[in-house]
Image: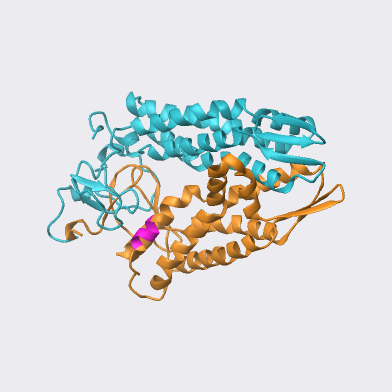
Chain colours: A cyan, B orange
Amino acid sequence: MSSTQPPTMPEEIIGTTKPRPAHDAHVLTARRAGLVGCTVCGQVSHRGTAHCPRCGSVLHSRAPGGTQQVWAWLLAGLVFYIPANLYPMLITRTLGQEMASTIVGGALELIEYGDWGVGIIVLTASVGIPIGKFIAITLLALAVDKHWKLDRHRLLQLYEIVEFIGRWSMIDIFVVAVLSALVQLGFVASISPGPAAACFAASVAFTMLSARAFDTRMIWDRIGEQSD
Amino acid sequence: MESDLRGLTACHICDALCRDETPAPGQRVRCPRCGTPLRTGHARAIDQLLAISLAVLVLMGTALALPFLGLEGGGLAQEATVLDAAEAIGSGRAWPLGVAVGALIFAVPLTRALALCYVLLPLRHGHPPRPHARAAFRLAIELRPWSMAEIFVIGVAVALVKIAGLATVQLEPAFWIFVLLGVLVTLEDIALCRRSIWTMLG
């Protein structure tokens, strides 16, 4: 480091290869040092810098508005999840007969026909993961808003699970896409997507955006360090 | 860039201020507070990443041109490509959904691979980064969650089970290429150490 140091206590700046020491309180944050860290490239700049000098991302010390964006996207995801389950996902036409099945109905059908494994995959991806995600994001946002004293490492783990697993809900959309591409008119049967497909895709996308709007740095803030 | 801030980095997860260290071979630098891996990169990583990205480019191009799945039933035969899947779900008024599915399955993975090649090729040869390399790399990072080739592969497997009773499905070349792409995209993610590449980009 050069002689003109940032306003920090150097012994607090630790770079380490050891995982997870617990001395949270002694770690200096970029924010307390009057700096702002870029979440895309890690570059630190002085507070008040609008764009990261390295990667050009917009810089915020914390997400503007706190958890507001998280709540907004989450609500949008929830709203679209309702018609996604009420309307048919898949419409099968067999010799003039039309059969519409919802997400849950289609999965139960699979289980009924003995395809337990696949039925459970579909149920998990389309029902278990979305609902688990709604609950997890609500918990995370509430923990930040209400300053709940929960284990920060646990909260972070929860966030990482949500981020990692959320995308996998899209499976059902791809199933419908492949089925309707394969089983076309001219066959004994034809399959086409129902109105639930678009609703479900939108719900998954909005929930992904909700998780991405969550600023994990807020988990680690002490009370009073938050809003910006 | 202010010189007094060089050598420092902030954890993107918890905002802890750390020295921007390069890990010893086979090790990773973790955030002292939240334990998030900050750097995993080693010298060979850029070669691996570049090789994977080039493979994704070539394979994705091939997979789009070849038939994906074939279907026989009731005396009729039919073939579908990956593009047909996007088209079928976006039929009629649902076209935005078709566009979105096409993006998630192949356009986004393709764009990411292109961006990574554009960024990494000059670095690999020790040249200075190309113009807009930083913007391209940022794009590659921000598109990551929307690149769903590997999820599509699992979706196809589920669809095959659903259809099994109805007709005989043939697995065409593009299917196997996509299975490989699913694996490669996952490996691409593992080999990518953002901070190391940002450092190289200056």
Magenta highlight range: B134-138
Q: Residue at x 56, y 34 (%)?
A: A200
Question: Does residue A142 appear to the left or right of B176 in the view shown?
Answer: left
The rendered magenta stretch, by its main secondary structure, is classed as helix
Q: Residue at x 39, y 57 (%)?
A: B194
Residue nearer the viewer, A22 or A194: A194
Question: Does residue A136 appear to the left or right of B88 in the view shown?
Answer: left
Residue nearer the viewer, B126 or B85: B85
Q: Is residue A9 above or below residue B41?
A: above
Q: In which quadrant will I find the C terminus of chain A? A: top left
Residue nearer the viewer, A219 or B64: B64
Question: Does residue A90 appear to the left or right of B100 in the view shown?
Answer: right
Q: Position of residue A123 (x, y in %)?
A: 65, 32
Q: In which quadrant will I find the N terminus of chain A? A: bottom left
Q: Position of residue A207 (x, y in %)?
A: 47, 35
Residue B129 among those drawn in magenta: no
Q: Position of residue A8 (x, y in %)?
A: 17, 48
Residue B136 among those drawn in magenta: yes
Question: Does residue B10 appear to the left or right of B107 in the view shown?
Answer: left
Q: Position of residue A27 (x, y in %)?
A: 27, 42
Q: Residue at x 82, y 36 (%)?
A: A95
Residue nearer the viewer, B111 or B22: B111
Visible residue check, residue A150: no
Q: Report the number of discs.
A: 0
**Which residue is outermost to the left?**
A4
Visible residue check, residue A8: yes
Q: Is residue A107 above or below residue B139?
A: above
